Every structure is written in structure tokens, then in C-alpha cells.
Amino acid sequence: MLTNELLNAVAAYCKNMQRSVTLVLQTGEHEKKQELYEFLAKLVEASDNLSLEQVDTQGTLSSPISFGLNVDGEYTGIQFSGIPGGHEFNSLILAILQSGGSELKIDDAIQSWLKNVDVDLNFEVFVSLSCHNCPEVVQAVNQFALINTKISSEMIDGGLFQEMVESRGIQGVPSVYLNGEPFATGKVEVGQLFAKLQDKFPDVGKKVTYQQLPTQDVTVIGGGPGGVAAAIYAARKGLKVTMIADRFGGQVKDTVDIENLISNKKTTGTELSGNMMAHLQDYDINLKENVRVDGIEKGDIKKLNLSSGQSFDSKTVIVATGAKWRELGVPGERENVGQGVAYCPHCDGPFFKGKDVVVVGGGNSGVEAAIDLAGMVNKVTLIEFMPNLKADQVLIDRASSTKNIEIINNAAVQSIDSDGKKVQGVTYTNRSDDEVNQIEVAGVFVQIGLQPNSEFVEGVVEKTQHGEIVIDERGRTSEPGIFACGDVTTVPYKQIVVAMGEGAKASLSAFDYLIRN
């Protein structure tokens, strides 16, 4: 698991640590104990700034295959239960580096809020080591723990703690518990975790004093390809630029393989997001991550109100907030997210090994999901609302020839049925004769396209009935000084390369607006 190449990288990362970190392993017996011990022992050999101790810390750590991070003999509040390989290896290394003094990747305003929490917050994050959404949540709550000693975090490998998973009825990851109670399930971002904390503890915000940001020339809302292009083009003009990104990278971060970005034959969403961040950091751009814009007040100078409680003024605004997975909107969907309802086949598919599932949606994403899941589950039923699938023919042919995929066209899902703990089935109507049918399944994967992230500009700019921001050929909206680009707009063809071009165009239009006004 730990190759020489990987250990050399760890050694390089740990070289400049300001504080040494001790990995404290709980004593006790477990069938995976020796494997975990050897993993940690090999890891700490990579740097003199790392050490390993095995002691009896019952009451602090959860199990014989749990270990915590200590700095100067003090527990940081960060705990890993299981062997953090796969995607979670990055979470472990980041936790070590940040415990050792590296800069936290949490916005200053959020840090100020968290420092004012005066009650114990104990986070548990159940993960799958193959889930690419889980590390973001683990890394977020680990940083929460480093900000305030009243906060603790624990990564739990669901595969090694099956009794806990079954007792809590967990069927999807990440699954986040706070003080033993469900807190968040499924794909959840740092900003959403923070928003949930704000809702749960509204009095904390009253204690926080925020630093006032000066008036900006351009504020870019969104950290995907369109937003990054817009911010860079604006900064190259010498303008004062701020980017607000509740999740840097946007939908691109969830894309596995990218083969149509001209001049780059093949890349991944993670790699492209990293490259965009590196390019952005070459310029004097004020990046505020993990917060969102809750509203914009119109005027010659726009006022932006942030989810952190901050507000500031900007002469122009570029909206590049992209889109999100569209929900079915039927009974039982939201109630069962993480308990059988999922939106990421790659992340949650392994939880349904040997079981029957439904995929809703006959476009490319739905058919691809069905093909992907067919290799893991017992049977896939693909339900499409229209009389025929809308996917590319090559995908339709592949799905049709896969023995454990059944395709039902011209059907409308009416509800997702459960016993209150887990999904039990799907009820759908045959649109040709209105016959009601039920399928017994353990999981439902919703793949019906994207919805523009434009709620916060309701009443500010003109939108279509589908929520897309209406723009002209220069990226201008109906409100002077507000521009938009990418998937959140009416521009056709939602593609990375299109969003980048639209972002550049919107930024040039904003610059033209500024010099003329």
C-alpha cells in the first residue's frame, strides 16, 4: 500500500513541519491490528517529524484499530478508525501536515465562527475508501477540530465497522454524525456543513466580529472552469478581484476522466481542479472558499451578503455558479438520502453488491450509471420517463446487451418506498396505460440531469423557467454590472471548454463596463 514513491512524497511534505506529530494507536486485539500497525510504522519512518506510540487510551479512542494525532503530548481531537488507505490516505497526510502547522484551508470567517463555539461537538464520518466525495468531509471536520479544542472528528471505515453501520441503518457515504445523531448524508460540501452548524447553533454568530473587505472591482461567484477563467482575466487587467467559491472546482471535481479539453489529451477532474488552483494562485486574487453568496443587493455598487455573516461591496459581479444534480422531487427521495437513495454510482455502488437497484434517467449519465452498477449489483432496472432512452446509441447498445440490466421506458416514478430505515422499493406509473407498478429494490440512483445554481439571484436578474440566467452575446444579464457565464446561464452546450471561454468573455465585458462607467 505504501510504495517507496509515496513515502518519498510524504517525506518531502513533512520536511517543513513546524511541530512534530505523534500517531497514538489504541492497544487491544483486532484481526486488522497488525496490518494497521505495520502501515503506521512504515509511514512514520518517512520523516523525523513523525512518531508512533501504542498506548491504552480507552475513553479517548474508539477501538483497537483507532489512532489519534497528538502534538506536543496533547490530543488534537483528530481520530482515524480503520486503515486510511485509498482516497482517505490524503485525509491522513493533510491532517498530519495541518496538525504540524500547515495553513488550514478554511475561510477566515468560518474559522472565526468555529472559534466561538463553546459546546462539545463530536463528529463521526462513516466512509468508504473508494468514495471520492468522503475525503472532503473528513478533511473539513478534521480542520474544525484543529480550530477549537471543543470539537473532535473521527473517520470510520464502514467496511471494518459493519455492526455500527447496520445498527445506524447507514447505506451511503459519507454519513456524518454529530454527538451521536445524524447530521449529514451523501455528497455534502464544507459550506453545507457550516450552514448546518449555523442553523443548529444560531447564537454563535452573534459573538463573531468579521473583518471588513474593501470594495472590489470584480467579484466572481463560483470556482469552476468559468469562474476561474473570469477571475484570471480580471486579475490580468489589474483589477481588484475576489472569488467566492463554496466548492472550488465545482462539478469538474466530480468528473473522473476528461478527454475533450483541447490541448490536453486526457486528464481527471481532480487534476484539472488542482491545475486551476495553481493558475489562480499566480495572480493577486482574494479567494474565499467554503462560503456562498446568499443574496445580492442591486445598485450602482452591488452589495453581496455571504453565508458566513460577512457582507461587502463590488462594482461588478460575475455569476459562475454552475449547476447541481437534479432531484426527482417525489416522496421518499430526500428522506432516504444515504439510506438507499444516491446520486453517485461510483461512491455508493459498492454498498449494494449482490442487491437489486433502480437507476432513474435515460440520458448518458443514467445509462452509464446502469452499466457501471451492473458489474457490482445483482440487477439494475433503468427507468426512463420518455418513450425512448436519450443516451448515445453506443451506450444504449451496451446497456441493452448487458444481461442484468432491464430497461423500462415511458414510466414515471411516483415514490421511493422505505420502512423508515432503508429503501424497500420504487413505485412507478406506466405512462401509456396509467398502470401502477412496484419494484422491490435496495437502492435508487437518481441521474436526471442538472439544475442551475441560481436561487440566490432570484429577483435580481432575469431567469428562464428552468432557472438559467438569461445572458446576451457578451455575458451581460438584465441587471447592469452583473454578468454570468457557464452552466448557470442560457448558453448552449454545458461543457468545460465552453465555460472557460464564456468566463473569459464575461470578464472582458465586466472590464469594458468598468472603464465606461
Image: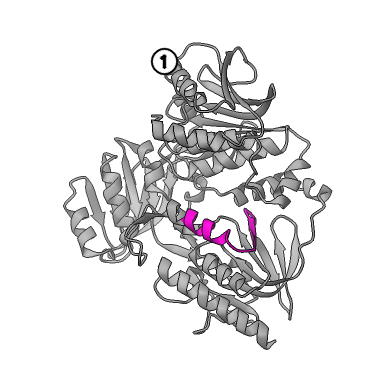
Q: Which residue is mark 1?
A: 31
Residue at (57%, 61%) from the top-left corner? 282
Residue 390, given in percent of the width and then of the height, sits at 29, 66
Residue 26: percent from the left, percent from the top? 56, 16
Q: Is residue 345 left or right of residue 400?
A: right
- 282 falls in the magenta region: yes
User: Which color scheme does this rendered protein use?
Assistant: one colour
Residue 277 magenta:
yes
Secondary structure state at the residue bearing disc 1: loop
Question: Residue drawn at (29%, 40%), measured in percent from left and top?
Answer: 377
Residue 434 or 332: which is nearer the viewer?
332
Q: Left or right: 350 with respect to 223?
A: left
Q: Position of residue 516 (x, y in %)?
A: 67, 88
Q: Along the line of sight, which residue is nearer the eye, 175 or 385?
A: 175
Picture quarter with the N terminus:
top left
Q: From what the image shows, is residue 505 above or below residue 80?
A: below
Q: Amino acid at mark 1?
A: Glu
Q: Is residue 37 left or right of residue 116?
A: left
The 10 Å Cα crowd at callout 1, few under 14, some 14 to 19, many 20 or more, is: few
Q: Residue at x 81, y 49 (%)?
A: 208
Viewer-proximal residue, 351 or 407? 351
Quadrant for residue 4, please give it.
top left
410 above or below 236? Answer: above
Task: Write down the region rendered in magenta.
Answer: 273-292
